[in-house]
């Protein structure tokens, strides 16, 4: 599988999960459950708090948060005194976010949704109209593609 195909595969997988009703973060994290070696349900739990810009607060984009959860699971650090590992991880995080911001200009959910999205904790029903008017599906695919291309391309 070439790099373009890998990115496209994971982008499609993440978008499909979103269409099944999972939130933005869950869709990105769960798309990578198998190559990360974690249970699908664990991936869903890891991403569950970050949908809607962190619990529908419309702050940091859930798909971006999902992308960073995947980065942490793949290349995170565990030793609090290993400053080089922290630095390397933060370089990776900044690289991933920079790629996203170059395309979308921001990582704030509210701005990505056009500035008028509700921050009510009540989830919006998933209807055809919901999917048609939201940029989320495209954004989720982009986050999955960035992660696949940057973190998993050499494995396939």
Image (tube, rainbow, N blue to C red):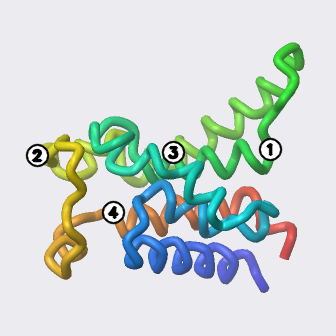
Please report whichever mark, 1 or 3, sits nearer to the chain's N-terminal start.
3
Q: Is residue 134 above or below residue 58?
A: below
Residue at 35%, 42% (x, y): give it: 55
Report, in whole angstroms, how far the alpha carbon at label 4 lies from the one at label 2. 14 Å
Q: Secondary structure at mark 2?
A: loop
Who comes first in sequence, dot 1 or dot 2? 1
The reply to whether the C-beta atoms of the residues labelled 4 and 1 are less than 8 Å apart is no
Report which quarter residue 128 is drawn in: bottom left
Q: Which residue is mark 1?
A: 75
Q: Residues within 10 Å of mark 4 (few under 14, many from 20)?
A: many
Task: Tell me the element at label 1.
Answer: helix
Q: Nearer the viewer, residue 20 or 150?
A: 20
Q: Secondary structure at mark 3?
A: helix
The answer to whether 27 appears left or right of 130 in the picture is: right
Residue position for label 4: 136
Image x and y of residue 76, in percent: 78, 38
Q: Earlier in the sequence, mark 3 or mark 4?
A: 3
């Amino acid at each position: 599988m070439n790099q373009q195909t890998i990115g496209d595969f994971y982008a499609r997988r993440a978008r499909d999960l979103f269409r099944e009703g999972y939130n933005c973060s869950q869709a990105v994290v769960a798309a990578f459950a198998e190559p990360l070696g974690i249970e699908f349900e664990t991936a869903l739990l890891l991403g569950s708090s970050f949908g809607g810009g962190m619990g529908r607060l419309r702050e940091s984009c859930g798909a971006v948060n999902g992308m960073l959860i995947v980065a942490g699971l793949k290349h995170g650090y565990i030793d609090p005194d290993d400053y080089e590992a922290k630095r390397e991880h933060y370089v990776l995080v900044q690289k991933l976010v920079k790629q996203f911001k170059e395309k979308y200009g921001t990582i704030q959910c509210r701005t990505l949704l056009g500035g008028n999205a509700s921050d009510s904790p009540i989830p919006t029903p998933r209807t055809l109209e919901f999917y048609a008017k939201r940029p989320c599906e495209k954004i989720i695919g982009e986050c999955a593609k960035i992660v696949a291309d940057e973190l998993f391309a050499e494995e396939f």
